[in-house]
Amino acid sequence: MSDDPDPRETKLHPRLNPRLIGHGEAEAAMIAGWASGKLHHAWLISGARGSGKATLAYRFARFVFAHPVPPPTGAGLPRDLAVGEDQQAFRHMAARSLPDLLVIEPSYDLKKKVVRAEIGVDEARKTTEFFARTAVGGGWRVAIVDAADDLNPNSANALLKVIEEPPQRAVFLIVAHSPGRLLATIRSRCRRLDLPALTTGEVEEVLSGLPDGGKKRAGKAIDSAIALSGGSPGRALELAGSEAAKAFSAFEAAMASARHHDTEQLVAIATSLGGRVSLRDYHLFASLMSDWVARRGVTEAKAGHSRLAQRWAEAHAGIGHSLRETNTLNLDRRETLVRAFSTLATIDASGRENS
């Protein structure tokens, strides 16, 4: 695997992970569906990035390959979806040699040496050919979509055609960070599992159990990264020691400044993130900022400040649209952030004046 140029091929890939922390209810729901003998053909697994969605999808796929036939009525059920690393289903999945598993994800561009931004229609159409084949040994065929957020309109419609008329003993496991952006017709045909944020202790447990000791390897910065992660181990690893985390700390300080807002600092943050800082750090910061705005809206709503809560909600939607447009059209990142900061500072100042 070390010779694979795809940057996603690391020891931390979800298909190699034998552990799942903190999502027992979701596992129980899947086990119940399997045991009923009437397993739903499409599952929409949603939650924050890095919260274990893909790990759960691969874990369930391994489980149905290892246990193609549910137990007789009245028999005891497994406690979880664990499959031993010495079992054939685990070893074959790790080696990417399961003929009845199809993974739909953005392809890797060998020439440009980057993962493409979208799941193309050709990738989605592979499901048609895949499900037209007979399963090896008459067992299950499983397609994992990781992630549905990367589908474009054409690929989403191509996927929908297969989901609408599912073949026998076929399962779609659809990972989604923002399920609301998925086609309503796809959502309506899926059983939805919303994975909750993990507790701080669960995040630490996940990181401590990673290959090479993820928590220890991340160093002292991991504690503040866990606090910012929103209960997502994957996000905590990305944030640890990152420029995004440093910029977000500066952003919070500037917004809380005694002068109401440190405008110069906000412009400096926008300039740094729009310049030499990596695109990954820019996206991480944008995600943290979006969560910050959402929390402000929730806080004002709980306090009974409905008009102010509405303004924060509108800002959240507007800034989110602006960020996506900037990514799609390759617009100026600095100017996008300056406009966002100006909007947030104006709303925050009005809230202080009325408090």
Image: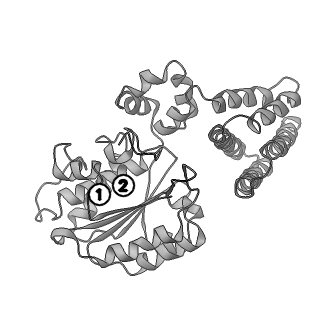
Decide if residue 164 is on the left or right side of residue 100: right
Decide if residue 47 is on the left or right side of residue 244: left
Q: Label 1: few (<14), some or many (≥20) within 10 Å?
A: many
Identify whether 278 is placed above or below 81: above
Disc 1 residue type (three-letter): Ala
Disc 2 residue type (three-letter): Ala
Q: What is the C-alpha distance between the residues marked 1 and 2? A: 6 Å
How many marks can you see?
A: 2
Residue lying at the far bottom of the rendered structure:
165
Identify whether 310 is placed above or below 239: below
Element under disc 1: helix
Residue lying at the far front of the rendered structure:
111
Element under disc 2: helix
Decide if residue 296 is on the left or right side of residue 341: left
Q: Position of residue 28 (x, y in %)?
A: 29, 53
Disc 1 target residue = 61
Query: Are the residues flagged by discs 1 and 2 in contact, CB closer than 8 Å?
Result: yes
Query: Looking at the figure, which quarter contains the C terminus?
Result: top right
Q: Nearer the viewer, residue 50 or 309?
A: 50
Q: Position of residue 161 (x, y in %)?
A: 46, 79
Q: Which mark is residue 57?
A: 2
Q: Nearer the viewer, residue 26 or 119?
A: 119
